[in-house]
Amino acid sequence: MDVLITGSEGFVGRYFKDNFDGHNVTSIDIKTGTDCRDFFKKEDKSYDLVIHLAAIVGGRESIEGRPMAVADNLSIDSEFFQWCLKTKPKKVVYFSSSAAYPVDLQRNDLDYRLKEEDISFDWLDMPDMTYGWSKLTGEFLAQFVPNVHIFRPFSGYGWDQDLTYPFPMYVKRAINMDNPFEVWGPGTQTRDFIHMNDVVEAVLTAVDEGVTGATNLGTGRSTSFLELAQMCMDEVGYKGEIKTNPDKPVGCMHRVSDNTKLLSFYTPKITLEEGIAEAVKKLQ
């Protein structure tokens, strides 16, 4: 099978690359000197499977602090879908984001689990910053391209994730036995953490089974940043003082997946506790 992975050297891309041994894989990433937009202008080959991950993301500070840089994703996705119309790949995976959901639904007082149908192009509510807008636009463009599978990952994590993200940052603070242990914002903001191995397995299962429409990738479990900090400290075996930092970016207060659709074809296997234990073992 001929497979193309854009953004192949990023955190998500590396996990997908590891699952295609024995296949003919083309890896494109700006980190290795090729802007995918240049590739799309020159490449005419039709691939069996295209996994489009190329995007400017970064952590919360990047999303809030560099909104115009993140907006470059509009250009990346426009070039990508034009290329798909030209080359007609057999199957396409497009990574959207939970950031595309209306921020109005992501409040602590609602305790709401985000459903795929909460995004409708008949009406649109404000998503999360320019990153959310770019992913909404990508989903809209995907409607005009055949054979596209859309996924909305929540907080994907793994031991080798960049330290600008909460999961590895908190594991590292626990290993270092930071005291106080800094937690951004009030710490009551919640996320739905899903291990990258489960993300990859869920995506490939959905593609194999022909699951259509946008699909959430999460566990349905709500974990606050205060709880995550405590879990990391418990795994390492020390008791530090948790100190919140209201001056740091917070993002939406309650972002958790409704997993009804995902569970119809795949059940996440790795618990957050197991993921923390793996990360501590790898990073100590």
Image (cartoon, helix red, strand yellow):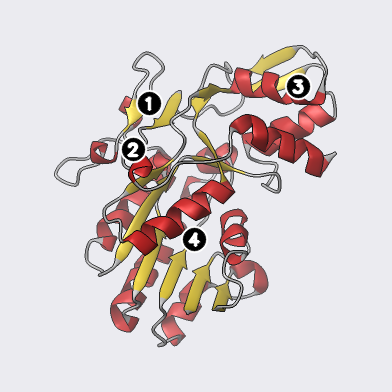
Tell me which numbered mark, 3 or 2, is placed earlier along the sequence.
2
19 sits to left or right of 183? left
Check disc 3 and report the residue beneath it.
233
Q: Quadrant of residue 122?
A: top left
269 sits to left or right of 121? right
As displayed, is residue 106 above or below residue 46?
A: above
As displayed, is residue 144 above or below residue 197?
A: below
The three-letter amino acid code for the residue at tag 3 is: Met
Q: How far apart are marks 4 and 1 (CA)?
A: 25 Å
Q: Where is residue 261 in the image (x, y as percent from the top left)?
A: 31, 42
Checking the image for residue 53, the label placed there is 4
Element type at marker 1? loop
- Disc 2 and disc 1 in contact, CB within 8 angstroms: yes
Q: Can residue 141 be seen in this view?
A: yes
Check disc 2 and report the residue beneath it.
101
Tell me which numbered mark, 2 or 1, is placed earlier along the sequence.
2
Checking the image for residue 106, the label placed there is 1
Q: In which quarter of the image is residue 150?
A: bottom left
Viewport quadrant of the C terminus = top right
